[in-house]
Amino acid sequence: MQRRIFFNTVIVLLLGVIICGVFSARIIEKNLVSSIEESLTAEAGLIRELVGESLISNSRDIDLYINKIKQITYSRITIVDILGNVIIDTDKDHSEMDNHSGRPEIVAALNGNVGKSIRYSNTLKVDLMYVAQPIVKTGSVTGVVRLAKPLYEINTMLNKLYTNILIAVIAGILVASVIGYRMAVNITRPIKEITYTASRIAQGEFDRQINITGRDEIGILADSINNMAFKLNETITSLQDKNIKLESIMSSVVNGIIAIDNAERVLFINPVAERLLNINDRAVVGKHLLQVVRNNSIDNYLKIILKDKKFFDTEITTDDPDERILKLYASPIRQTDENDIEGIIITIQDITELRKLEKVRTEFVANVSHELKTPLTSIKGFAETLKTGDIEDKEDTIRFLNIIEDEADRLYRLINDILSLSELEQKKVKIASCEIKVGKAIWEVLSMLKSQSEKKDIELSMDVEEGLRTITGDIDKFKQMLINLVDNGIKYTPEKGKILVEAYNLKRDADKDEILIKVKDNGIGIPKQHISRLFERFYRVDKARSRNVGGTGLGLAIVKHIVILFNGEIEVDSQVGKGTEFRIILPVQKQEPQK
C-alpha cells in the first residue's frame, strides 16, 4: 500500500506539472501568434496607406521605399496586383516568382478581406506567418499588400518553455518523491499499526491497544478497534469462564453425556462418556456418532427416537475393552418451539456393578436358602423320626440327637456369618479404636486353633519381625480375620501339613508405614480360574468337599470386608498341590472409627 501511495502521488504531481506546462506553452504560443498577427496586420495596413495609391503605377520608384520599411519592421513585404502577379518582393526577384492568386491570404485580400495564413517554408525551413490586406482605389481592389514574418521568436520561446517544463518535471519528480514518500509513510504507518494490532487481536491477544492519537478517520478507526478488543476480551473471558465451569460440571457428573443434532453429529461429549464408550479420538465434535461410537445398538436407538419423536430408556451391552452394561436416557434439545427438536441429549449410566450386585443378591438369596434348607431338612427329618418313638436303640437316639445338634451348630454358624457379613457390608460395625500388637494377636489366634490343628497333625508356626509396628483398630475383627484364614488353611491342608503366619514391617512409600501379614499353607491349592472369585459369598471351589469340612462359604468374604475396614489390601497366590498364600497389607496409621 505504501508503494502504491508513493507512485500515485508522484504520478499525480508529474501529470499536474506536465499538463500545466503544456497548457501554458499553448497559451503562450497562441498569444505570441496573435501578437505577431496583430503587428503584421497593423504594418500591412500602414504600408497600404503609405504606398498603396502609387504602388501599382510606379513600382520601381517605390521599391527603395519598401526596402527601408523592411529594415524597420524586419518583415518580408510583397506587393501583388489584381491578377496575382508579384510586382514587388523584398526578399526575392519578383520576376522569378510564381503567380500568387491561389494563395489563401491573397484570395481573401482580393475579396476585400484581411487574409491570414501560416505555412511551412521549404526555403527557410521554418513556419511563416502571412498577413495580406487589399489595396483599394476608387472603391475597388487594385492589388494586395502582404507581409510575412518567420516564427523564429515563437519557436525559440517555445523551446525555452519546453526546456523549462522538462526541468520542472525533473524537479517535480524529486519533490514528488520526497512528498510522496513522506505522505505514504504518514498514511501507512498508522494503517500498518492497525493491521498488526488487529492480527494480534485475531490471534487472541485482546489486551493489545493501538497507540494512535487524532480525531481523523484513522484515529476514529483506532479507537473503534480498541473498544472492540476491550469488549471482545470481556465477552470471551466471560465465555471462557462459563465454559470452564460447564466443563467442570460436566466432568464432575458421574454419568456420561452426549449431545447430538438431528443428523446424529456430535455437538458435545463429556470425559465420562468417552471413558464408558472407550473413545480415544479427541476431535469428535462435528463427526457422525457412528464414526465415534461403533455401536449399532446406540445408532438404532437414536434412529427410532428421531423418527418417532418418542423418548424412552434402554440398556445396551458393550464389550470394548471390557463388558459393560449401560443404560441410556434420551432427552430432546429444544429452543423456543416445543415441537421443534434440534437434537438429543443422551445420558449414559454405567449399571454394570448394579446388575452384578443384583445377580449376586439373587445368587446370595438362592445360596442362603439352600444352605439353610439343608440343615433344617436334616433337623426336621431326625426330629420327626425321634418323635414317632419307633427307635428303641438308645445309641441311635443319641446319634440322631448329635446329628441334630451338629446341624443346629452349622445353622448357627451360618446365621452368625451372614449377620457379620451384612454388618460389614453396610458399615454398621462400630470399630473399637485400640492399639493392636500384631505379634501377640497372631500367637493368641494360633493358640485358639491349636487343638483343631492337632486333630489333623498340622503344624502351626509364626514368624514375626522384631520391632514390628502396631496398628490401631478393632482387635476382635483383626483376630476374626486371622482365625478365618488359619481355619481355612487347616480345613484344606492334608494331615501332617504346615501352616505359617508371618508378619513384617513394609515400606513401599516414604510417607506411609505398613505391615505385611502372610498366611501360608502347603495344602491342596486353588486352581487359577477360581482365584478371582474366591472372595465372593458362598463361592466354593469344591462344593462337596467344602460341606464335608464344615465351611459356610462366607469366611473369605468376611476376611475381605475386614481388610477393607482396616483400609488394607489382600492378595492370593496359589498352586494346585503345593499350597496357598494369603498376603494382607495394613496401614500403620491410626484408624478413624466409622459411624
Image (cartoon, helix red, strand yellow):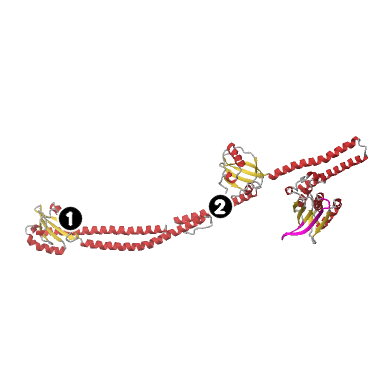
> For the residue marked with disc 2, what is the amino acid?
Ile
Say whether disc 2 or disc 1 marks the residue closer to the N-terminus.
1
| Residue 539 falls in image quadrant | top right
As drawn, the label of residue 116 is: 1
Specify the segment rendered in magenta: 494-516
- The numbered dot on residue 236 is 2
Q: Quick one: label 2, few (<14), some, or many (20+) residues within 10 Å?
A: some
Which quarter shows the N terminus?
bottom left
Find residue 166 and report its horizontal and vertical position in percent.
30, 62
| Residue 551, x across and y down, in percent | 81, 46
Could you tell me if the residues under marks 2 and 1 are in contact, i.e. CB atoms within 8 Å? Answer: no
Residue drawn 38% across and 60% down?
180
- Say above or below: 159 vs 327: below
User: Regarding mark 1 in the picture, which secondary structure is present there?
Assistant: strand
Mark 2 vs mark 1, foreground winner is: 2
Give the Cα distance between marks 2 and 1.
85 Å
Q: In the image, 397: left or right of 298?
A: right
Residue 196 image offset from top left, x and y in percent? 48, 57
Residue drawn at x 90%, y 35% as measured from the top left: 388
Q: Is residue 570 left or right of residue 242?
A: right
Q: Amino acid at mark 1?
A: Lys
Asked whether the viewer can see residue 331, the reply is no
* Label 2 secondary element: helix
Query: Residue at the spot x=81%, y=54% of the render?
Result: 499
Is any part of residue 101 visible from this angle?
yes
Magenta segment includes 509: yes
